[in-house]
Amino acid sequence: MENMGTSLERIKNDIENLSKFNSTPEKGCTRFSYTREDQEVKEYLIQIMKKLGLKIIVDGIGNVSGRLEGKEPNLPAIMIGSHLDTVLYGGKYDGVVGIVAGLELIRVIIENDVALNHPVQLMVFAEEEGSNFGVPTAGSKAFTGQLKLEDIKRLKNARGESYYDVLKRKGLDPDSIDKGIVNPKSIKAMLELHIEQSVLLERNQLSIGVVKGVAGIKAYSIELVGLSNHAGATPMNLRTDPMVAAGQIISAIPAIVKENGLSSSVATVGRIECVPNIFNAIPHSVKFTVDIRDVDNRAMDNISQAVKAYVNKVSANNNLTFKIEKIAVSSGVLLSEKITDLIEEVVKEKNIPYCRMNSGAVHDAAIIASITDVGMIFIPSKDGRSHVPEEYTPYENIKEGCDVLLEAVLRIDKL
């Protein structure tokens, strides 16, 4: 048992095979939840899990569970989980690495005839990226009761289809969503292996990140409304120009973060829309998003309030009206010290260079942390790139992460 480890070849084959379920093979990997590619990749994975003898459950929102029973099936399960959906033109490692790690872990347990006391449950969470309905981690939120049937009926995609109708069209049963809410007592702990999606590990030549906290998010849509007019005939001193004000606000955000946040705080303007968006007219309105993140919830609150106050000030100075809408919110989460310490012990014993760190990205693990002990393991991302076709993590690093995950599960089973 001392030399028991995961298979590099199987890990590579799994990731390469899963990446073939892709609507944009010419440009990265695109696999939105509830598309044909999503249905096919899940069916492919389900067939593999069935051959391993796992009990399969698909809930009303499309979460897939594969369960390997332990010696004592009534004990709470050790959960391994992540997601298979991607952003548009994303990479083939984000989320997928965590699913493949769980699959490989179960294979190793079976082929080495390891008799665990607790069941092991592999979870494939739906709609983690939020690409369809603008709600990240929707699957794990439904799983923990944080996303309800009324939410599913209210949320709509860009085509105006409700989440509820899309689920029905895909053969799922959204009316049973509440029946899929997990009993917290049925889970002993949850672990997620994930690519870092940043540069800390690579730049410091570290192989493992032991995640101690996951950043929360406060995201807003800000709309500034002025008066559209002719670009050439309107004097500068008679303009009510929302684009000028938007530029002032956007350029001030780094200073607002520095003054009101912590060293771990970040804020991003990732989308901007202009109406009428023609070169020879002063805009009528400008709409942009502000995405604020930190593990520290108070820091996020302080930055949010400062941004809102500055929007009010700049709008008044430019004779504009404005509207601020909250579009996403989740709290920063500190992960289980018990599980984090256990992962750190494993890494130390394996003499793997590592650090404790926070995650700036949101993960399903952060949602599951509301109901049980959770730990996360990071592995390096080449050049810190993620959500792009260039996303890459060497397979040797992935195997190392899988081996740490395997040992962590074996130790959690004995707790």
Image (cartoon, helix red, strand yellow):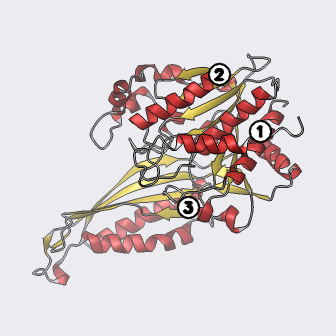
The image quadrant that residue 14 belongs to is top right
Q: Secondary structure at mark 3?
A: loop
Amino acid identity at mark 2: Leu
Disc with the residue nearer the chain's start (2 vs 1): 2
In space, the residues marked 2 and 3 are separated at their CA atoms by 34 Å
How far apart are the alpha carbons under marks 2 and 1? 18 Å
On-image quarter of the C terminus: top right
Tell me: 59 left or right of 337.
Answer: left
Measured as percent of width and height from the top left, residue 414 is found at 85, 30
Left or right, 35 with respect to 189, comes to left
From the viewer's perspective, is 81 left or right of 125? right
Kind of residue indicated by mark 1: Leu
Mark 2 and mark 3 lie on one chain; the one further toward the N terminus is: 2
Residue assigned mark 2: 54
Q: Label 3: how many residues lie within 10 Å, few (<14), some (14-19) or many (20+)? A: some
Give the x, y percent position of residue 370. 62, 37
Task: Name the residue rendered at 15%, 74% in the picture.
Answer: 280
Vertically, is 92 above or below 73? below
Q: Which residue, given by chain and number where applicable, does mark 3 sit on?
A: 385
Residue 353 location (% of width, % of height): 80, 59
Q: Position of residue 136 (x, y in %)?
A: 48, 44
Q: CA distance from mark 1 to mark 3?
A: 26 Å
Disc 2 vs disc 3: Cβ atoms closer than 8 Å? Answer: no
Q: At x 73% / y 23%, what residue is drawn?
A: 119
Name the residue that disc number 1 marks. Answer: 406
